């Protein structure tokens, strides 16, 4: 029988008995009508002492899911619904790559990557962003999505990195990013990189890829291979990886132009107007 909670807190505190540490494993599908919090105290940024393992079971959380130093794992397929979004802080571990479930998120995704991008593993099952306008926020490191990401319905998805002006931190899509509704908007308000030549940029089935409306809009092409840029206007443009990235027409760049790691930009017979650096 499925298990339903009003709120669920999976916690480890060192003043409790030692066997309170470890992995808490689901034995049925879980529904949380409120919030889900996985934490440990005192906080440890390098060692995960407390983990929720879903295994093959499904999870549906109506409210906010919070990882504060705790671990969230799924070793089997199935589906996860984060109705109130997901937030992580510090030395957490979010890893569903062993099971590659489908994931639906209806609220903000806020990720603090103190220990590197290996702490946030989406798996390769489809992630659907739906129902409510939301923001994908991260800081300190780049945030990778190995999963394909679909914006479903007439919602706006923004990106945010408070440190993006200081370097090359970015949200990196290693699979495709798409939208299925004419009212779907993906707004690049911090650097967004595309890392797979098969799915290189937000050319949506339907909807809008807004890559110029913010002063911090930066699009990066970080894959190896030749590619013709689909747009002739950019706020910021980063080019990395081997191969030639070619203009498709006279192009205006109202922000930074950054080329590194063997990245090259082929102008051909087109003009390039750069007002940034």
Image (cartoon, helix red, strand yellow):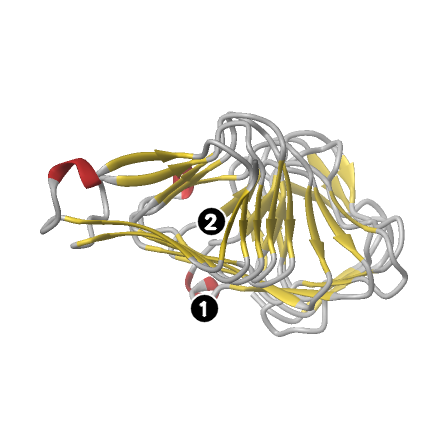
In the picture of the structure, the residue carrying the numbered disc 2 is: 142
- Evaluate whether residue 75 shows in this view: yes
Q: Residue at x 12, y 48 (%)?
A: 14
Q: Position of residue 60 (x, y in %)?
A: 59, 49
- Look at the numbered disc 2 and give the secondary structure of its residue: loop
Q: Is residue 227 left or right of residue 37?
A: right
Query: Distance from label 2 to label 1 (Cα)?
Result: 12 Å
Q: Position of residue 259 (x, y in %)?
A: 57, 47
Q: Position of residue 223 (x, y in %)?
A: 63, 35
Depicted 197 relative to depicted 4: above or below: above
Q: Residue furthest front?
A: 1
On-image quarter of the C terminus:
bottom right
Q: Nearer the viewer, residue 119 or 277?
A: 119
Q: Residue at x 29, y 48 (%)?
A: 91
Q: Is residue 254 left or right of residue 172?
A: right
Q: Is residue 87 left or right of residue 115?
A: right
Mark 1 Cα shell of 10 Å, populated few (<14), some (14-19), many (≥20): few
In the picture of the structure, the residue carrying the numbered disc 1 is: 162
- Evaluate whether residue 138 shows in this view: no
On-image quarter of the N terminus:
top right
- Look at the numbered disc 1 and give the secondary structure of its residue: loop
Depicted 144 relative to depicted 185: above or below: above
Could you say which disc has been placed on residue 247 in the image?
none
Q: Position of residue 109 (x, y in %)?
A: 54, 58
């Amino acid at each position: 029988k499925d298990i339903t909670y009003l709120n669920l807190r999976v916690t480890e505190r060192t003043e409790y008995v030692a066997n309170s540490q470890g992995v808490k494993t689901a034995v049925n599908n879980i529904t949380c009508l409120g919030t889900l919090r996985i934490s440990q105290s005192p906080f440890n940024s390098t060692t995960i002492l407390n983990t929720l393992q879903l295994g093959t079971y499904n999870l549906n959380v109506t409210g906010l899911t919070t990882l504060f130093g705790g671990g969230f794992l799924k070793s089997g397929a199935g589906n996860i619904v984060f109705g109130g979004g997901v937030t992580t802080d510090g030395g957490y571990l979010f890893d569903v790559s062993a099971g590659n479930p489908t994931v639906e998120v209806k609220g903000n995704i806020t990720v603090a990557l103190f220990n590197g991008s290996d702490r946030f593993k989406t798996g390769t099952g489809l992630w659907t962003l739906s129902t409510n306008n939301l923001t994908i926020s991260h800081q300190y490191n780049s945030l990778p999505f190995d999963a394909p990401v679909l914006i479903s319905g007439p919602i706006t998805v923004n990106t945010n990195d408070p440190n993006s002006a200081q370097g090359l931190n970015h949200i990196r899509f290693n699979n495709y990013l798409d939208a299925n509704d004419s009212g779907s908007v993906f707004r690049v308000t911090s650097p967004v990189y595309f890392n797979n030549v098969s799915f290189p940029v937000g050319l949506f089935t339907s909807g809008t890829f807004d890559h110029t409306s913010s002063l911090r809009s930066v699009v990066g092409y970080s894959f190896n291979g030749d590619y013709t840029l689909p747009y002739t206007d950019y706020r910021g443009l980063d080019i990395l990886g081997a191969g030639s990235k070619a203009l498709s027409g006279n192009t205006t760049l109202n922000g930074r132009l950054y080329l590194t790691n063997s990245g090259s930009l082929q102008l051909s017979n087109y003009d390039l107007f750069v007002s940034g650096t």
